[in-house]
Amino acid sequence: MSAIHVYDYIVIGAGSAGCVVASRLSEDSNSTVLLLEAGSSDEDCPNISIPAMVGTLWQTDIDWSFKTVPQKHAAQAYTDETIAWPRGKILGGTSSINYMAYVRGHSADYDSWERLGCDGWGWKDVLPYFIKSENNTCQKYTDPKFHGVGGPLTVSDHSSYRTLLSKEVIKAGIELGYPEIDINDGNCIGFGDCPATIFDGERNSTARAFLHPVMDRNNLTVTTNALVTKILIEDNKAVGVEYMIGDKTESVRVSKEVALCGGTVNSPQILMLSGIGPRSHLESLGIECIADLPVGKNLQDHLLCQLKGSINEESGVMSLNDIMDPKYQEQYKLDKTVCIFEFYSSVRSDCLIRKYCRIRQYVAESGRLWTNNGIESFGFIKSGLEEDVEWPELQMTMFPMYYAIGPDEPKVLGINKE
């Protein structure tokens, strides 16, 4: 029988949170950290790095491919009245398969958590960490009270390729009396461009931003294709984790803490598999209840209402078929090569950054695949239905994607043929 390894910390899930947590914990060279991820390495999937290829990542091996139960009063346009719920199963988690929108939310939302007892989660508490983690390259939003430079997570405006539609939506918002805003300054009521986690034309997931730069730390172990099945609990304390690699079950012990970063769906599932959850539900599945708690009970998702219309060729909107066109993909590779060559061939340090920015702007204007090809602008508004609401309840998203053109698009989106 092989010896059971012991780590100071075990992080479950190498997603949007887990990569950051593992990176920060392993800064202490005296602590050992194990990061467990159910999916594979993001380096095994080249399409991840190309922002506009996001639509090709869903319903694949790197997506948990969750679906809702059939809906009675919604999802009538979707096959079997079920809605696909993409969640990343790969290093970087959902930050490796999402549309890269960088949206912090309204300050009053954080302050409400603080009032409910979540100490340290008020806007004044979290803002310094947003600033610290950010490497803001946006030309439009640069106020140092809200944005940082030099952090691990690069945020760009990717505005060199925007459709005409997104620009007109912001104009329309201004005509209605709303201001044009920086959507991440904590007071997001109005219309504005959507920054994205894109760096030099590539997706900047949390794996790319926080994990890959520290993978060579001797005290950090990253294990992929490791499906966690249970947190081991003794005397009301987490003492280890049980996981599977293939059909083999492994156990590992922890001396300090287990950090559960499995995401909205997987975290409550792992808690319940470990005996933490509603007693009646766990016992119906033959799971011993250690703590009778309403785990998963208050799950909420966005209510989404899509408005669709006709467009003309001048709108600049692309379809998934356009993105899959080899000519765009070859142009993307060529543009990247030119960009990298020009960057490293610059010899004068005082003009290096300025020259690089000009090259990036030129290259981005020449290639559509540098953009996230989706979320371009937002409108945040109050409905006026509830007077005491402190923040906007409605978020309008300008998502200029040409639906249902080729045979792959209905499959990806789940829209039925009718």
Image: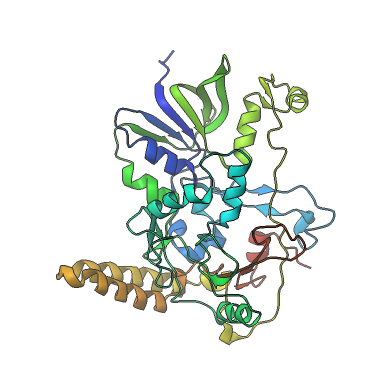
Asked if one can make out residue 44 in the rendered structure from this viewpoint, the answer is: no
The residue lying toward the viewer, choosing from 133 and 16, is: 133
**Count of marks overlaid on the render:** 0
- Give the percent coordinates (x, y) of residue 308: 71, 74
Farthest residue to the right: give it.
72
Q: Quadrant of residue 113?
A: top right
Q: Is residue 308 above or below residue 105?
A: below
Q: Residue at x 53, y 28 (%)?
A: 243
Q: Quadrant of the N terminus?
A: top left
Asked if one can make out residue 128 in the rendered structure from this viewpoint, the answer is: yes
- Give the percent coordinates (x, y) of residue 201: 40, 66
Q: Residue at x 65, y 58 (%)?
A: 390
Q: Residue at x 53, y 44 (%)?
A: 121
- Give the percent coordinates (x, y) of residue 224: 45, 38
Farthest residue to the left: give it.
347
Taking 142 as reference, is 66 left or right?
right
Taking 334 as reference, is 399 left or right?
right
- Give the percent coordinates (x, y) of residue 397: 62, 68
The residue lying toward the viewer, choosing from 330 and 185, is: 185
Taking 68 as reference, is 327 left or right?
left
Question: How does the figure colour the protein chain or chains?
Answer: rainbow
Q: Quadrant of the C terminus?
A: bottom right
The residue lying toward the viewer, choosing from 416 and 71, is: 71
Q: Is residue 309 above or below residue 292?
A: below
Taking 392 as reference, is 20 left or right?
left
Q: Is residue 127 above or below residue 271?
A: below
Q: Quadrant of residue 114?
A: top right
Q: Residue at x 47, y 41 (%)?
A: 18
